[in-house]
Amino acid sequence: MDMGRRNLMISAAALTLGPGALRSSSALGAGRAERPLGYAIVGLGYYGLDVIIPQFVNCAHSRLAAVVSGDPDKAKRVAAANGLPARSIYSYADFDTIRDNPDVDIVYVCLPNALHAAYTIRAARAGKHVMCEKPMAVSVAECEAMIAACKTANRKLMIGYRCHFEAFNREAMRLARTGAAGKIRYVRSEHGFVQRDPSKWRLKRALSGGGSLMDMGIYSLQAARYMTGEEPVAVTARESTDRRDPRFAEVEDMIDWTLEFPSGAIAGCQSMYSANQNRILLMGDAGRIELEPATRYAGNMMWLGKDGREQAVTPPAGPGKTQFAGQLDHLVASIRTGREPIVSGEEGLRDMRIVEAIYRSSREGRTIRLDNNRRPNART
Ligand code: NAD
């Protein structure tokens, strides 16, 4: 990205059409004195402990109510540091007794991917709403079982797709939808980082369900869908992995896939565990929208290129103080209003259908056509 482009600023006001339709705080009835809903965080690893728990201070309608961990000492420390009583600590073994805790409204599953389905289903059966981290699960069948369990229990299910609450991504979506770059013809979306430690669960297929695609590739895939606002009709993928590298004995390193959309737009997506990359590019017939970095926790940047000029875009604020707070409060709003979350279990299932098609295409060396008209629970 050349610095000349970065220096040209375009004001958010000039680009803003109105309040975002996804704003969750308005759905909550600002000013109404309702108690914040309580979240139980399952899994006190990097994301649950270091990223999500510190975000409750930024929330207007959500609070930390319990922790679930396999490490009793860590759980006690975290509970004490967050003012939780001992009765708000659960192990994986006694997790199901969370049904008797009225302080817990929502269970947030921050576990390795292969455990998402089991804990989502247990949470729903315990009568709790569920926020589940991405990827939703490791197979379409698991996603369907999660949706069914939440439906049976009459509980909401939301996937932790935080970018839908991130200011730059929301503004890029709005710009794309309102034709700021003309008709979108091509999307490029690349996400990756250097995965150095071969002992990580992310590199063990039984826990991760796959390699970079199941981790950073979900961002590339999501972006292609939410930026175009379309569902792909075909996917063609290929993988490049050095299987002699001990990190990649079980899962893929790099995978590149092309999505074809009904409008004729094409998305070239990629993920890898051997380079740092975080970029989304939208090419329209009247300009370009580029985000780099695109989906980080903070510090994202965006440019609009049009009529021979490249301008940095400063987006209006997102729905929460941070993307995480917006995400956490959105599920509360969905529960209170009875509306489906904008990133529901069905949204995670749609991604997983495409993920399975990406792997299949790469394995079989051919284009896989996707049927978007089938009923949500129909099997291939
Ligand atoms: P992590 O390894 O740091 O934490 C995983 C936690 O699960 C640990 O506390 C671990 O003890 C616990 N655990 C329970 N049973 C386990 C088992 N059988 N094997 C291994 N660990 C077990 O991982 P993380 O980075 O916190 O990722 C957790 C989830 O969050 C993943 O699904 C990941 O994709 C997702 N995540 C999302 C984002 C995001 O930006 N939305 C970022 C990072 C991670």
Image: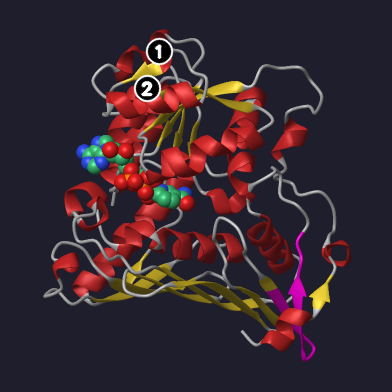
Location of residue 169 (image quadrant)? bottom right
Quadrant of ligand 1 in image: top left
Q: Which residues are magenta?
A: 303-315
Other-residue count near label 1 (Cα within 10 Å), few / some / many at <14 / 14–19 / ≥20: few
Q: Which residue is mark 1?
A: 86
Kindly tell me whether residue 339 is visible in this rendering.
no
Q: Position of residue 324 (x, y in %)?
A: 58, 44
Q: Position of residue 336 (x, y in %)?
A: 65, 23
In the structure shown, which secondary structural element does the residue marked by tag 1 occupy? helix
- Would you say the residues marked 2 and 1 are in contact, meaning their CB atoms lie under 8 Å apart? yes
Q: Is residue 14 magenta?
A: no
Kindly tell me whether residue 353 is visible in this rendering.
yes
Other-residue count near label 2 (Cα within 10 Å), few / some / many at <14 / 14–19 / ≥20: some
Q: CA distance from mark 2 to mark 1?
A: 7 Å
Of residue 33 and residue 47, the one placed in the foreground of this image is: 47
Of residue 63 and residue 279, the one placed in the foreground of this image is: 63
Residue at far bottom of view: 308
What kind of secondary structure does the magenta stretch mostly adopt? strand
Name the residue: 30% across, 25% down: 73
Location of residue 32 (image quadrant)? top right
Residue 76 marker: 2
